[in-house]
Image (cartoon, grey):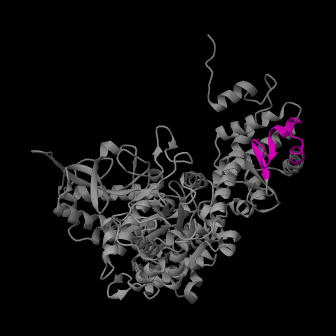
Amino acid sequence: MAAEINWTPMGCAALLAGSSGVKRDGAIDFPCDLLSRTGELNLDPGDAFFAWEIARLAGEKMDSKKQRALIMLILAVQAMSVEGSTRLPLSGGGHFDRIFKDLQADDNEKVLIKALLKESGEACSNPGSGGLANIFGKTGDYRPLIFDHGCLYMQKLHALEERVGKKLRDRISSKEEFSEDKPAPDEPAAASFEEALQEVFAAPPTAGSVKAALDEQQKLAVRTALNGRITVISGRPGSGKTSIVASILRVLARTGRPPLQSVALAAPTGKAADRMRQAVNSHLVAVEGAGAPDQFLVDNCPPSNTLHRLLGYSPGRDRFWHNELNPLSEKMVIVDESSMIDLTMMDHLLRALQPEARLILLGDADQLPSIEAGAVLRDLCRSKAAVEEKKRVIVLEKSYRAREEDSAGKRILEVAKAINEGRPPSEAGAGSALATRGDVSDIIFEGVEHLVPGDEDQKAAFLTRWYELLTGGLPGLNERLSYPYRSGPGGFDPESTAKLKEVMAHFERSRILCATRMGAGGTGSGDINTWFYHRWLEHLKAEGLITRNPHFLVGEPVLMTRNDYSLRLYNGDSGLVLKVVIESAGSRRSAEPMVVFPRGGSFVAYPLEALRGCLEPAWATTVHKAQGSEYENVAIMLPAVYVRPLTRELLYTAATRAKKSVVIVGPQEILQLGISHSLERASGLADMLRKTAKT
């Protein structure tokens, strides 16, 4: 009986080259020993197999040492894309030296790789010569690897970056002029843009008893966004970006150019989109003495959606409904949290826009970039053409979330600024912004505090203190968890809705943020969620609220981990497990644990079984998953040992999630290591923006 063939990439490699690397059927050696070197680079055996397949295109004339160097070079380019970069810089030092150090390349291998790069560059000038010319090309060639701007790209990423660069360049260079779209017949009489701007600026919303007027930078951002085909507005969390969006909409409600129904609000995640909607609505209802245009806007404010929903993503076909052949009808698209947009998503968005449509991108260029490859917002903010020549980028300096007038908020801002500049937080505010705590009992949850745990018991003591913050911060918590929230065909009844707003707001007030999900010496979000699960389980059993050990507990915060378009739930949406009674015509089921999510100012509930495999606990989350969120209190759990995800950008993003309190938990040396490591992606979008437009 013939032996069964393993049709995995590694099985095929073994079949062709043999597990010992012996050639079969003229195939080049498969580098089985390189597999052990790829762990530090987050590559898997399939990546090694792909690199080997590309190397085979060079033919059989290459000697074994050069073949090995070629495979290592391809692995290095792949590793850069896995990290989020779009290319491998070829100059000595920086990314080039680091990536081959992680690949454990010895001196002889480095010499061979550099010689191979020189030979490959020469082969690009003779594309029909075979060998390396089958693999390497220059701009405009269709080869697996492309040389451009002194870097080496995978062909797909180079094509994406070049296409996105051209579309952005065209928008940046377009003539700046107001749209001449006519207002819709049912909209208020149109005003001139200047009249509308002055009216909006003169009637800001009121926060408490103080008018929250726009500052000069914000006014400039509004004016810039209403001109031209692209505007980038970058600022720290709480710097007034939402006020700018609301002001733009108020101007459009007065001018009708473009009409409100031709405006789309979007964000990369469902949670960010929902927060955008809430923030804009809160701004609009706070305008005192609102006139007819403002009331019209309140009643007809454009809805906010995820980018996937806006572009009509079909998970079954894995493609978008809207593209250059079927563009969006909207004449203006405003996107929040744009630092999270990767190169591929930006490509889809730009292809779906009509040429004359305006694109307004808002975000914080200093925050963590997208998980996938690219750093689009950062590159736009560094583009000379966008910033200096065409002035399409506005950077907001002042923060209104943690107000500088508030002592706790000011300390958070000062520490975040120090981290962003690569300085120790102990230097922030002339040394007064950071308070060092030697014991858990000393924490007051105000401003920025650094707890340096002496041992595992102290870490557990901090988690206990955080648990007490959660359970003691809302009176009658047990009654609220045992209450049967009633939902019918029209949604939750008024009493249930009021109670849900209180309990949901309480659990969204505080969050532990981690660098990683697993590992890191027991400081990953998975380990911390497990700790809280068992502690919460003990509490529920002691209070007689539960008798068994379910997978998710009543009162447990949860996160969606994937998109479910049929339920309109998206990766990153946060909910709470509560007891819900579903009422329908003439019947009522008994209360059962369900997941309740906020939606459009109200709430929706889904059975736990319907979301099996889509949920994870959210007592603690990774910093990546917290992007687009804000909390009263944040705890940053440092890993016990340094891990690569711990960077300056991650710490800055974590600290700026808080409005009132940040507690940093972990060793001083680990904190400083994180601040000293910057997540500098190698991307070429700024280079593409400098290119002369092709005729």
For residue 377, above or below residue 14 = below
Furthest residue toward top: 1
| Residue 70 among those drawn in magenta | no
| Residue 141 among those drawn in magenta | yes
Q: Quadrant of the C terminus?
A: bottom right
Tell me which residue sits at (29%, 67%) in the image. 471
Q: Nearer the viewer, residue 370 or 241?
A: 241
Quarter of image, res 520: bottom right
Tell me which residue sits at (32%, 88%) in the image. 209
Residue 271 position, x and y percent, is: 41, 60
Instruction: Answer yes or no: is residue 453 visible.
Output: no
Residue 411 position, x and y percent, is: 49, 83
Looking at the rendered structure, the number of numbered marks drawn on it comes to 0
For residue 34, above or below residue 299 = above
Residue 256 position, x and y percent, is: 42, 68
Tell me which residue sits at (65%, 32%) in the image. 9
Q: Is residue 164 left or right of residue 541?
A: right
Q: Quadrant of the N terminus?
A: top right
Q: Nearer the viewer, residue 371 or 286?
A: 286
Residue 464 position, x and y percent, is: 37, 67
Q: Is residue 478 left or right of residue 384?
A: left
Q: Nearer the viewer, residue 42 or 582?
A: 582
Give the residues in magenta.
Answer: 121-147
